[in-house]
Image (tube, rainbow, N blue to C red):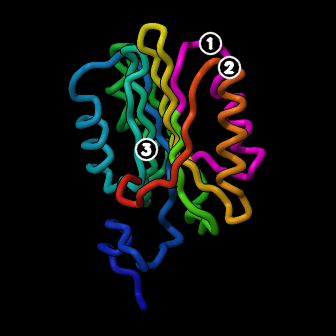
């Protein structure tokens, strides 16, 4: 079966991969203002790049976005096209070619971990250390500090070999030592 331009551009499931298409990880960081996403993605689309994955958040008023795009465009050309975003010095843009990777099939199941309580150093490291020790992989992580209240929400893939009840007990024990509360529950696939 021959690859069609539309198969590559729109990343259709089962579509073929073109050896000429490269994958780039692009980060945009800096002071927030309206229009950053529209301008960035418009410039990338103008180059014929396909936006495969992205995430964006505000971190204490600072804009942070990561994108994974594919297309037959050199990193230098992408950097030149995005350079106007950085002209006033409030944003930084980086472009890096990365290997094409397909998502690994997970033999286990998706879970959601939430942790909340008084803020203190080490919460993320301690709780997610327990998850890593059970072979769990964090696929998405959000943390927020509101006054003295700290909130962590993580999406996890747990291997089939992990015992969710045992992991829940371990996470709660470590959370208790930190003075915070934690819950681990199976994720509804509609949530992810």
First in sequence, mark 1 or 2: give its number. Answer: 1
Tell me the quarter of the image containing the N terminus. bottom left
Q: Give the residue at the far bottom of this rendering.
A: 1
Closer to us: 7 or 147? 147
Q: Is residue 10 covered in magenta?
A: no
User: Badge 3 is on which residue?
Assistant: 67
Q: Give the residue at the far top of this rendering.
A: 147
Asked whether, in this view, residue 13 is left or right of residue 18, the answer is left
Closer to us: 64 or 16? 64
Magenta segment range? 115-138
Instruction: Tell me the distance, in whole angstroms, between the alpha carbons under discs 1 and 2.
Output: 8 Å
Do the residues bearing badges 1 and 2 touch, measured as CB atoms within 8 Å?
yes
Asked whether, in this view, residue 13 is left or right of residue 163, the answer is left
Q: Nearer the viewer, mark 1 or mark 2?
A: 2
User: Badge 2 is on which residue?
Assistant: 178
* Image location (x, y in percent) of residue 106: 61, 65
Secondary structure category for the residue under label 3: strand
Q: Is residue 185 above or below residue 181?
A: below
Q: Nearer the viewer, mark 1 or mark 3?
A: 1
Asked whether, in this view, residue 66 is left or right of residue 163, the answer is left
Closer to us: 87 or 186? 186
Question: 10 Å neighbourhood of mark 3: few (<14), some, or many (≥20)?
Answer: some
Instruction: Tell me the distance, in whole angstroms, between the alpha carbons under discs 1 and 3.
Output: 31 Å
Q: Is residue 137 covered in magenta?
A: yes
User: Badge 1 is on which residue?
Assistant: 120
Q: Number of numbered discs present?
A: 3
* Image location (x, y in percent) of residue 108: 62, 64
Report the residue at 21% width, 23% height from top.
34
Report the residue at 72% width, 39% height from top.
170
Closer to us: 183 or 6? 183
Report the residue at 41% width, 87% height from top.
2
Question: 10 Å neighbourhood of mark 1: few (<14), some, or many (≥20)?
Answer: few
């Amino acid at each position: 079966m021959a690859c069609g331009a539309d198969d590559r551009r729109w990343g259709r499931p089962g579509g073929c991969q073109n050896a000429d298409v490269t994958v780039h990880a692009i980060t945009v960081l800096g002071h927030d203002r309206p229009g950053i996403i529209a301008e960035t993605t418009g410039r990338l689309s103008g180059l014929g790049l396909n936006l495969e994955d992205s995430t964006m958040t505000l971190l204490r008023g600072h804009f942070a976005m990561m994108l994974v795009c594919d297309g037959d465009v050199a990193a230098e050309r992408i950097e030149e096209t995005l350079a106007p975003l950085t002209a006033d010095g409030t944003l930084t843009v980086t472009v890096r070619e990365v290997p094409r990777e397909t998502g690994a099939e997970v033999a286990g199941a998706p879970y959601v971990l939430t942790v909340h309580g008084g803020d203190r150093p080490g919460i993320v490291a301690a709780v997610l250390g327990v998850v890593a020790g059970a072979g769990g992989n964090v696929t998405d992580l959000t943390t927020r500090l509101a006054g003295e209240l700290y909130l962590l929400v993580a999406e996890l893939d747990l291997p089939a070999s992990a015992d969710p009840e045992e992991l829940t007990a371990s996470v709660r024990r470590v959370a208790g030592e930190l003075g915070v509360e934690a819950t681990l529950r199976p994720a509804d696939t509609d949530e992810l």
